[in-house]
Amino acid sequence: MIYHVGLDIGTSSVKAAAFDGQRQMLASVSKAYPTHSPKPGWHEQNPEQVVRATVAALKKLVAERGCPPASIGLSAAMHSLIAVNSKGQPLTHSILWSDNRAASIASQLKGTLLGKDIYRHTGTPIHPMSPLPKLAWLRQNEPTIFHKAHQFLGIKEYLVFRLFGEYLTDQSMSSATGLFDAERLAWHEPSLDFAGIGAGQLPRHVSPFFILNKLHASFAKQIGIPPETPWVIGASDGCLANLGAGVMSPGEAVLSIGTSGALRLTTHKPVYDLGERIFNYLLFPPHNGEPATYVTGGASNNGAVIYEWFCKQFYGLSPSAKRMERHRLSMESIPMGCEGLRFQPHLLGERAPVWDASATGSFQGIRPYHGLAHFHRAILEGILLNMKQIGDVLEEITGPFHTIHANGGFTKMPFWVEMAGEIFGKKIVVSKNEGGPALGAARLFEINQSSH
């Protein structure tokens, strides 16, 4: 059977998924890798572990299918940064989006004329998540590494270099770095100046439809595919999640709540907010007479990871434990609003809509009659109310939307999905296909071929 693979390089694992011509998932394989935190607020990974996990996931999937795929499309988490030397060897670990080491640099830049210019041209809010302040941090704090660096890459770009021997990035991933002007399709000089680098130290940017088909023979043998198998360089995971969900028209949004959370719309023009509360990333540049496609929205650090924290701290259980069922039933009897109890979910700092890495969580309005069930419900409401704030900003800037396509782990709790409908006051459609970014990546070859 002919199938296409979507390869999604996530924050905690890589997922290789096979899809048929009707976009139905046939099989998927995930391989995890650890995140290291050598200092408080630091989060990084060994890029070679990610490469090994990727090759292992593809090898297992291909072996299970019994034949090579027709194509492989790439998706990856945004905002990682790796410095490599002239031989392509890492000088740093992969510094993740959740890493806060550049918080002071981001706070100094945010709100300045330069910061506003960078946001306006790149669509990336000023925040320690993005490579822009991370580069400035390296220059100031690790000058030896910074000056030895031949290239600065993200994790997808590092994988492409290891597998194909080329320094390439797609324009979608580029648009989430704070370094790239997605309208001009060029590196933004004021950003480069702030970071202290030249455009030659960044990989060559290409269309998300760009085909790689000269896989190193050793990797082709390991995976079990011909070296000429077409790989589509792809886009970022957030943008491809919208494509995978089929949300490509005005009036619809995608709400994802997994470990983190995000609410995103698809547009055909860049959308900017004077308050710098939302991102604006490129999915596709103009092609074959079609206008550019952008994904605009906001991402939260505080998704289901906060619910997992609550269940462990207050009940000593995992959210998936069977004994949690009775606690959930008790929580469901509490009225909306938790009788005045409010939860601010910013335990992990926050991106949208406040973009404050130092933000903290809190319960407010506590009264003697509030019991554990009130706190339980307040956690779920607080996470959704934070997402609703992002939705309010999007409607203010882009106009109303009527339907929300929901995906991620929170959809396994029907009561939480119902709560989302009440809080947003919108129609909620639970995505039947859990392919997400992997499905979006797998579709890229089909879109590429149909446009030629």
Image (tube, helix red, strand yellow):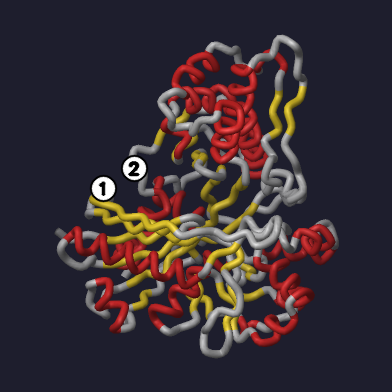
Disc 2 and disc 1: Cα gap in Å?
7 Å
Above or below 256: residue 159 = below
**Nearer the observer, 278 or 382:** 382
- Residue type at mark 1: give it: Gln
- Residue type at mark 2: give it: Asn
Residue 229 in view: yes
**Where is residue 199 drawn, in percent x and y?**
64, 82
Residue under the point 45% across and 79% down: 161
**Nearer the observer, 21 or 14:** 14
Q: Secondary structure at mark 2?
A: loop
Circle 2 residue? 433
Is the N terminus in the top left, top right, bottom left or bottom right quadrant?
A: bottom left
Above or below 242: residue 209 = below
**Where is residue 195 drawn, in percent x and y?**
73, 75
Residue under the point 69% across and 28% down: 343
Q: Secondary structure at mark 1?
A: loop
Q: Residue furthest bottom?
A: 86
Circle 1 residue? 24
Marks 2 and 1 in Cβ contact (< 8 Å): yes
Residue 339 as seen in the image, left or right of residue 288: right
Above or below 207: residue 352 = above
> In which image quadrant can residue 214 be found?
bottom left
Residue 123 in view: no
**Where is residue 91 drawn, in percent x and y?**
60, 79
Of marks 2 and 1, which one's residue comes earlier in the chain?
1
Disc 1 packing (10 Å; few <14; some 14–19; many ≥20): some
Residue 301 as seen in the image, left or right of residue 222: right
